[in-house]
Amino acid sequence: MRLPVLLAALSVVSACGGVAQVTKSGATAEVGVGFGTAVGNRGAVAPVVGSSLTRDFMDLTFAMESGQELQIFSRFEGPVTVAMTGKVPATAAQDLGALIARLRSEAGIEISPTTGPATITVEFASRADLRRLAPTAACFVVPNVDSLAEYRRLRGQDAVDWALVTRRERAAVLIPADTSPQEVRDCLHEELAQALGPLNDLYRLSDSVFNDDNFQSVLTGFDMEILRLTYSPRLVSGMSREEVAARLGTSAALDSGQSTDWTRAIELALGRGGSQAARKASAERALALAQAAGWQDGRLAFSYFALGRLLAGNEPARALDAFGRAATIYAGLPGAELRLAHIDMQLAVMALAGGFAEEAIRLADRAIPVVRAQQNAALLATLLLIKAEALEALGNPSAAAALRMDSAPWARYGFGSEGMVRSRMRDIAAVAGRAGRG
């Protein structure tokens, strides 16, 4: 489908239609069909002293998500054990086992599961209980405690302030038990990584879970390199920032590579609060700030992507342009295949709504292999359901039914309850219904 034809059709559619904890960002508000959680994986390689990796390591390790700088390097010294407590979901043990195996083989960390007292305790509690302590976080990690109850008692005290930790002894990873299996897995990856290593997130990183854009949520090869460097024999807990920099042959100066104004604008654009108009204005401000800063990397691409999502329902021509600009930038970045698949999903939804079933199938087919390989169940199920609705529109109900059946295991893992799965199916069917209504 050529761009001008799709644009014309979509124009018709638019006419009708705290420092104590380190957190994983909560789900962003969804636009249209939604924004599934992304995963990625690349083989780790040995870190090179004085490389760009060491600069990223410094910026991740010696600052926190709040922007507060850290002066002392901390990590666990000696073997690390991990135990799970609380209402442990059925899928958690297998996912944790796979993660620990990767941390051992790819990052070289001496880490193992246990059923007794542990270095890191993963406690599963109700989402409501966790939100009382961290309203905007999907999950989080706290130092020097081994339970939610202990954190409640110590909350606000120096003992649970990551900024005051000079050597890691214990930590608690707190995850909702009443969520989808995929979110449980994603929380295990991000929060265990931050319990072990860096406490910061940087939007400039194109292939990392240490990035609040939430595209990557399973540890990538880059992340394993960062963790391997964290546990390098060249380093030890208690070193100053300058000492670590000297050991790595790099600068002790930090550079987050982003402005607080841009970060705030992105958070407002993708948050659940505020009107659609206010969120769109925030996305446009984020894009303007990125352009003014001269960024040409993932931060600019993400600004375009965020704006495209907010424009897709009412200004499809502008949305299509924003997604196209984001895709052009991502195509030139390492490890951005999953980001491109997210864009293809958004474009497939727009094509389906515009009555272009063949184009929706082409876009879904291009994204599905990438998403399947990286095991992003929520995004894969969404793409399969989009393709099923397109097949239905083309008069092939038997193929559509078979594809919906194929999507079921992925949907249950990605979305959780049967009710959530049915809700997603209804959402996508409603999108297809727009084209039928003209």
Image (spheres, rainbow, N blue to C red):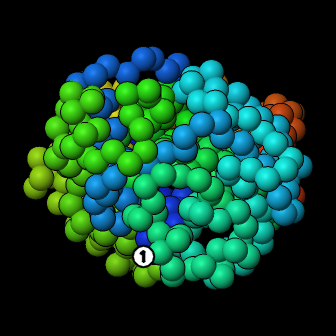
**Is residue 302 positioned above or below 14 on the image?**
above
| Location of mark 1 (residue) | 276
**Is residue 400 positioned above or below 37 on the image?**
above
How far across and down, in percent of the image, does residue 134 sit?
Answer: 57, 75
**Is residue 256 positioned above or below 403 on the image?**
below
The residue nearer to you, when weighing 202 against 173, is 173
How far across and down, in percent of the image, does residue 227 sit?
Answer: 48, 34
Quarter of the image holding residue 282?
bottom left
Image quarter where the C terminus lies is bottom right
Left or right of 94 on screen, residue 165: left
Q: Amino acid at mark 1?
A: Gln
The residue nearer to you, when weighing 297 against 161, is 161
How far across and down, in percent of the image, does residue 289 sit?
Answer: 17, 60
Does residue 354 show up?
no
SS for dot 1: helix
Q: Residues within 10 Å of mark 1 (few under 14, many from 20)?
A: some
| Residue for point 62% across, 21% down | 105
How far across and down, in percent of the image, does residue 83 sit?
Answer: 78, 49
Left or right of 55 on screen, residue 288: left
**Is residue 295 positioned above or below 179 on the image?**
above
Does residue 105 show up?
yes
